[in-house]
Amino acid sequence: MELIKNINELTEDKTLDFYENMFNALADKIRLKIINEISKSPNKNLCVCDLEEKLELKQSKLSYHLKKLVNANILIPEKHGTWNYYKINEEQIQFVLSEDTCCKIF
């Protein structure tokens, strides 16, 4: 899913699908912890191996949550050698959590 810059061009159903996907991805404690850990890191990105250690999660469970966040375009994956690093897509977060979203979706 890509960043939607002009949500007004979408149909009502597509707009609701977009927000449902975004809020679904954010409505999980583990995924919020992932975002929180990445935001606290000095480089604003973390390796899967670091997230496994910090969150004490098995790789398979962590991968599931990371995939949900990547599919919602909330996290951006970057491959460095054999490891994937993840950073927060600040533009997407700002768009989804803007005042317009809270006050008027349509």
Image: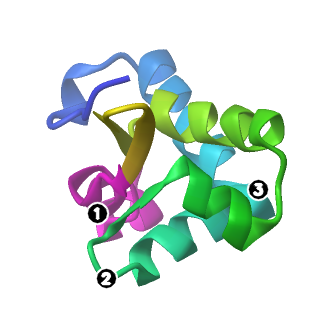
- Residue 28: image tag: 3
- Relative to 76, residue 101 above or below: below
For marks 1 and 2, give the one nearer the viewer: 2
Kindly state the secondary structure of the residue where label 3 is placed: loop
Q: Earlier in the sequence, mark 1 or mark 2?
A: 2
Locate residue 73: give its quadrant: top left
Kindly state the secondary structure of the residue where label 2 is placed: loop
Residue at the image position 59 percent from the left and 53 percent from the top = 49
The residue furthest left is 5
Q: Earlier in the sequence, mark 1 or mark 3?
A: 3
The magenta segment is: 87-106
Going by the numbered disc 3, the residue's amino acid type is Asp
For marks 3 and 2, give the one nearer the viewer: 2
Going by the numbered disc 1, the residue's amino acid type is Gln
Residue at the image position 25 percent from the left and 34 percent from the top = 3
Is residue 79 or residue 15 the one in the foreground? 79
Q: Which residue is mark 2?
A: 42
Q: Earlier in the sequence, mark 3 or mark 2?
A: 3
The quarter of the image holding the N terminus is top left
Going by the numbered disc 2, the residue's amino acid type is Pro
Query: Disc 3 to disc 2, how far (Cα)?
Result: 24 Å
Way the structure is coloured = rainbow
Pointer 1 with pointer 2, Cβ within 8 A: no
- Residue 13: image tag: none
Q: Which residue is mark 1?
A: 94
Please indicate whether residue 51 sits to the left or right of residue 64 in the image: left
